Amino acid sequence: MISRGKLERAGVPMNEQAEAGIQAMSDQLRRRLDAESDVLFGTARLWDDGIIDPRDTRSVLAQCLAMAHDARARALRPNTFGVARF
């Protein structure tokens, strides 16, 4: 739609060739979005912390809540040996 409006504003007549070009761009974009919307696409690029198996959701959530609860009770000790840098 945007490409069609842009061409019309530029005074380019909409013919079969222009429609075919717009359709090809639309198809290419649709294929790319379908591929990049896959759950494995994002996790393979480390955009998240991984995929949780739906059967393990309760146990993972319980672990996360337990860690958040325990964090308040832990006493932090200052670092006495320096900072490891890699």
Image (tube, helix red, strand yellow):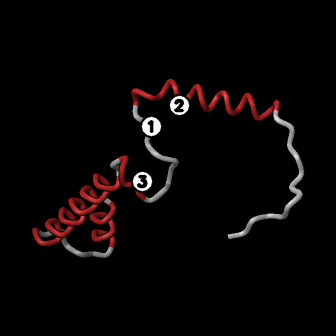
**Residue ID for mark 3:** 42
Task: Give the residue type at disc 1.
Answer: Ile
Q: In the visual, does 43 lie left or right of 9?
A: right
Q: CA distance from mark 2 to mark 3?
A: 20 Å
The secondary structure type at the circle numbered 2 is helix
> Which residue corresponds to the image point at 13% horizontal and 69% vertical from the top-left?
15
Q: CA distance from mark 1 to mark 3?
A: 13 Å
Q: Which marked residue is nearer to the observer: mark 1 or mark 3? A: 1
Residue nearest the observer in this picture, 19 or 55: 55
> Which residue corresponds to the image point at 50% horizontal and 24% vertical from the top-left?
58
Q: Are marks 2 and 3 in contact (CB under 8 Å)?
A: no
The secondary structure type at the circle numbered 1 is loop
Residue 74 versus residue 32 in the image, above or below: above
| Residue density around tag 1, few if under 14, some if 14–19, many if 20 or more, within 10 Å | few
**Residue ID for mark 2:** 60
Q: Are marks 2 and 1 in contact (CB under 8 Å)?
A: yes
> Which residue corresponds to the image point at 24% horizontal and 57% vertical from the top-left?
31
Task: Give the residue type at disc 2.
Answer: Val
The secondary structure type at the circle numbered 3 is helix
Residue 37 versus residue 64 in the image, above or below: below
x then y, percent, for residue 66: 66, 27
**Residue ID for mark 1:** 52
Task: Give the residue type at disc 3.
Answer: Gly
x then y, percent, for residue 74: 82, 35
Q: CA distance from mark 2 to mark 1?
A: 8 Å
x then y, percent, for residue 73: 82, 30
